[in-house]
Image (cartoon, grey):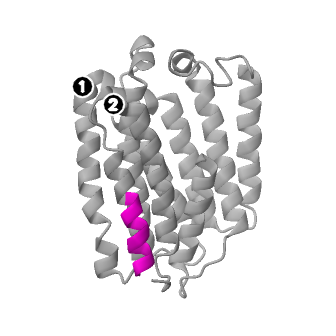
Amino acid sequence: MNLIIVAAGVWVGATLSATDGTGALPFWATLSAMALTAAGNAHNDWSDGDKDGINRPDRPLPSGTISRSSLMLLAGGLFAAGLLALIPLSQSHAFLFGLNAAGLILYNAWGSRRPLVGNVLVAALVGSTIVFGALESGINERVVVAAAFAAAATLARELVKDVQDIDGDRAVGARTLAVAVGAPATLRLANLVLLLLVPATLLPFLFLDFGGTYLLGMGVTNALLLAGAPGKALEAARSSRLLKWAMVTGTVAFLFAESRII
């Protein structure tokens, strides 16, 4: 699911940056972004093995499906594949790839165990996939709006995930926001982000000439965002799933933002 969202994000960036609003899926940019994301996820599993042993014992590393050395080889191979896919692309692609690679390493090695810093890092990384797809044609205000939506939705979900993982984080000494200030305060911040995000999704329809297809897609997305607003810590897992699906439907809405179907 993560890789599908990344591929769709690159496609959204290419579509919104194209002058006719019908940008084709950029193969090499998509492959590079997906490979880097997969490498980052593999390295994250390696870095968070102690936490996952408590929060997610069924995952490959704590369950013994894969060894730590094999996981690092996998991460390295995927990173190399992402680098190779950069060869036909521009220097701007290479720069953003390097910046995101550094961000992923920083998050996995340090940020995931610090309050709010890690959440913001992941949000920025997700938003940057849309920018990555737009680099060939040029970044415009539509691309910026889509990237901001992706980042904001991701930030809310990452805060919810902090609450979901609070037991393992506390056990290994990680100082996430949920550990530092408590689950209720973290959920209130997540709800505040959603409260600001939902009405903001109407602005592209009002001011950027996004069509009715976008509005319909965002109607579904906003219903999921509101349904995913967590009321208490026990709802964190459910909220996380709903917010992830909201990211999927939101991506589709932006993909058809300039469609005149409706």
Residue 257 in percent (x, y) is at 46, 76
The answer to whether residue 140 is above or below residue 192 is below
Q: Label 1 belongs to which residue? A: 181
User: In this picture, which residue range is highlighted in magenta?
Assistant: 211-221
Q: Quadrant of residue 190?
A: top left
The reply to whether discs 1 and 2 touch (Cβ–Cβ < 8 Å) is yes
Q: Nearer the viewer, residue 120 or 222?
A: 222
Q: Specify the quadrant that holds the C terminus.
A: bottom left
Query: Which residue is depicted at the point 66% across and 52% down?
Result: 34
Give the class, few, some or many, for how many residues have Cα within 10 Å of label 1's Cα (few <14, many ≥20).
few
Query: Which residue is depicted at the point 69% across and 56% down?
Result: 32
Residue 247 in percent (x, y) is at 46, 54
Q: Quadrant of residue 111?
A: top left
Q: Label 2 belongs to which residue? A: 115
Q: Quadrant of residue 105?
A: top right
| Circle 1: element type | helix
Q: Is residue 74 visible?
A: yes
Residue 46 in percent (x, y) is at 63, 25
The answer to whether residue 221 is left or right of residue 193 is: right
